[in-house]
Image (spheres, rainbow, N blue to C red):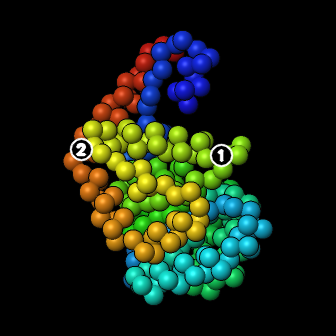
Amino acid sequence: SPLWFKTVSEKELYIIPDDLYFLNKFIMPANYERKNKYIVLEVYYSINELEKNIDLYRRFIRNIKEKYLFDVVFLPFDKQYGGEKQGEFLSKNISELEYFSIKNDRFIKIEDTLGLVKNASFIICNRYHLFVFAVANNIPVIQILKDVLGNKTYYYTKSKGILNQVFKDQYCDEELFFSLSVKDCFDNVVNNLEEITVNQNKLFNGQKNKNEKIMLKKRNEFLNMIRNNE
């Protein structure tokens, strides 16, 4: 992070957007069109924690279906306990939850993730990189901040950095994008989904496009500088 970098070095710091924010233009999203609107859910808590809170997940998924007629699709990012096992457990215990399988790949394919994200109505995630995908594609999102070393600073500072770049010169209420617990997030989405969506969509405007052009220019300048120094 910039804060820690400055404590160990006096060299100039270049702040550029995440590598996954601007994808190669030849990467095409997989086709994931479907009849019903849906929410993408991605978490990778321990199985023990999911077991303790299974009723919370079940109630959320059923409430979303009943109130908004939305499906919920679980998206794993990694094999085993990086999301795959969690998705298998939740879908086994919640019949209404749809599970998107990674199949034989080590990680979820970018094309699959992009297709799921671009066609989603809303995203709930743990992972920073899914948060980046959502913001880059103007999809309303809430990130449930996980603890790292006893607090939520790690994920908060990374994701807040993206918001600062994308929504520069706009007022951005970070509470629109972050939640401190699964329960708080689920309650908020069930009760305020339409309001959250409207308020985030207001931020996905021309000023965001202008900032993205600046971000892309900085990224290209940095890459050119590296090439010229090789």
Please tell me which residue lies in front, 122 or 226: 122
Q: Is residue 170 above or below residue 182?
A: above
Which residue is rendered at x = 58% and y = 68% of the image?
Answer: 183
Q: Which labelled disc corresponds to residue 4?
A: none
Q: Is residue 8 left or right of residue 20?
A: right
Toward which corner of the image does residue 193 lie, by quadrant?
A: bottom left
Coordinates of residue 116 in the picture (x, y in percent): 47, 66
Which residue is rendered at x = 47% and y = 64% of the image?
Answer: 123
Toward which corner of the image does residue 216 lie, by quadrant?
A: top left
Kindly identify which residue carries mark 2.
207
Which residue is rendered at x = 73% and y = 73% of the image?
Answer: 52
- Using the numbered discs, state the Cα–Cα distance from disc 1 to disc 2 in whole angstroms: 33 Å
Q: Is residue 9 left or right of residue 204?
A: right
- Looking at marks 1 and 2 on the same chain, the residue that comes earlier in the sequence is marked by 1
Classify the position of the N terminus by image quarter.
top right
Callout 2: SS: helix
Which residue is rendered at x = 27% and y = 38% of the image?
Answer: 169
Callout 1: SS: loop
Task: Find out whether the residues at labels 1 and 2 contact each other: C-beta distance under 8 Å.
Answer: no
Q: Which is in the foreground here, disc 1 or disc 2? A: 1
Kindly identify which residue carries mark 1.
151
Q: Is residue 224 left or right of residue 213?
A: right
Going by the numbered disc 2, the residue's amino acid type is Gln
Going by the numbered disc 1, the residue's amino acid type is Asn
Coordinates of residue 82 in the picture (x, y in percent): 69, 58
**Residue 203 visible in the displayed image:** yes
Please tell me which residue lies in front, 136 or 189: 189
Count the marks.
2
Coordinates of residue 18 in the picture (x, y in percent): 47, 39
Q: Is residue 4 above or below residue 211?
A: above
How packed is label 2: few (under 14 Cα within 10 Å), some, or many (20 or more)?
some
**Residue extending furthest toward the left:** 206
